[in-house]
Amino acid sequence: MAFITDDYIDGYIEKCPALGWQGGPGFKTLVVTLANGREKRRACWANVQHSFNLPFRNIKPAAYANIKQMHLLAMGRWGNFKFKDHLDYEAANAQFAIGDGVETVFQLGKLSALDGVFYERECYVIRSAAITVNGSPVSPTVDANRGLVTFVSPPANGAILRWTGEFALWVRFNQDDLPFSIDNKSGGQNIINGSVSLLEMPPPPLP
């Protein structure tokens, strides 16, 4: 593992969580109930924030050591690291931009649409990416830590930019402590149980 910046660790917790892990998107909304029973609501966040609760069941000391190592490097809630959301980690020919003949740098993302209403989720930790412009494969530079795609020449005005690949998230521990327990032994090794709570974070700033 290495640090990309002071508080961004280029690494994953290697041990997969057990079945029963929970996670998903969240927003923050201010809600005021009026005297007539109606509500006034204001969306405080433009970008989604995912959170996760991950159980680790009946793991051996080597697997626990990897989780503890990440917690130590991150110093609890301070540091950020990478995490694969097993419920949402793929883009399949997803449109992420339309060229204007001027811009050369674009943010990868996934577009959700329903009855003409759109929400674009930005994607940052890029594990693989095949880029097309109007259906033709191209090879721009991809910043795998920030999800930024840079073309040598700007795509033409109206050109449709799409990508297929896998992505992950930047997260941090949502806990400063790491309580795990020894609950059994097998083959002379301790059998360990515990859980971690993670919260999605934005990507590292540009240098």
Image (cartoon, grey):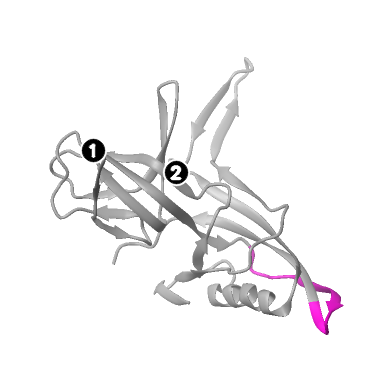
Which of the two marks, 1 or 2, is nearer to us in this view? 1
What SS does tag 1 mark?
loop
Q: Amino acid at mark 2?
A: Asn
Answer left or right for 108 relative to 158. Answer: right
Q: Quadrant of residue 143?
A: bottom left
Residue indicated by mark 1: 134
The span picked out in magenta is 175-190
The answer to whether residue 18 is visible is yes
**The quadrant where residue 161 appears:** top left
Residue 71 placement, left or right of 153: right
Who is closer to the viewer here, 34 or 205? Answer: 205
Where does the image place residue 139, in percent across and percent down from the top left? 24, 55
As drawn, is 32 to the left or to the right of 196?
left
Instruction: Please name the residue shown 60% across and 21% down the image.
Output: 34
Front residue of this view, candidates 180 and 35: 180
Q: Which residue appears at 54% of the width and 41% of the height? A: 28
Marks 1 and 2, the one that precedes in the sequence: 2
Q: Nearer the viewer, residue 82 or 139?
A: 139
- The mark found on residue 47 in the picture is 2
- Type of amino acid under label 1: Asn
Gap in angstroms between the C-alphas marked 1 and 2: 27 Å
Q: Position of residue 24 (x, y in %)?
A: 59, 45
Q: Residue 60, image x and y in percent?
A: 74, 76
